[in-house]
Image (cartoon, rainbow, N blue to C red):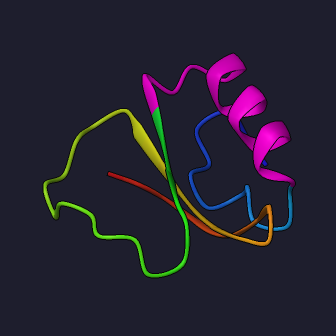
Amino acid sequence: MTDTDAEGYAGLRVERAEELARRHGWASVRVLPPGAAMTMDHREGRLNLAVRDGVVVRSWEG
């Protein structure tokens, strides 16, 4: 995972992923549990974390 790699957080516990994301300079981090409603607006500098059972299953910018 690099500082700007939005897709490199899968497999991490959500708390660790949030900590690393902020340390790596992501302006905001959005945690999305299964089935969560979310807006489809793209926001540069926002990291989205899809989380199941406390573990990140997918991460992406926007």
- Majority secondary structure in the magenta region: helix
Spot occupied by residue 5 in the image (x, y as percentages of width and height):
62, 48
The residue positioned farthest toward the bottom in the image shown: 35
Q: Is residue 33 above or below residue 16?
A: below
Q: Please give the name of the residue rendered at 69% of the width and 35% of the height, measured from the top-left corner.
A: 18
Q: Is residue 58 rendered to the left or right of residue 43?
A: right
Q: Is residue 41 above or below residue 35?
A: above
Q: Is residue 62 rendered to the left or right of residue 54?
A: left
Toward the viewer: 52 or 41? 52
Toward the viewer: 5 or 26? 26
The picture quadrant where one finds residue 40 is bottom left
Q: Please give the name of the residue rendered at 55% of the width and 67% of the height, measured from the top-left corner.
A: 33
The picture quadrant where one finds residue 46 is top left
Q: Is residue 12 above or below residue 55?
A: above
Q: Is residue 23 magenta?
A: yes
Q: Which residues are magenta?
A: 13-28
Spot occupied by residue 38 in the image (x, y as percentages of width and height):
27, 63
Q: Is residue 57 magenta?
A: no
Spot occupied by residue 51 in the image (x, y as percentages of width and height):
65, 66
Q: Is residue 27 rendered to the left or right of residue 24?
A: left
Q: Please give the name of the residue rendered at 27% of the width and 37% of the height, measured from the top-left corner.
A: 44
Q: Is residue 6 above or below residue 56?
A: above
Give the tally of numbered discs. Answer: 0
Spot occupied by residue 29 in the image (x, y as percentages of width and height):
50, 37
Q: Please give the name of the residue rendered at 80% of the width and 64% of the height, measured from the top-left corner.
A: 55
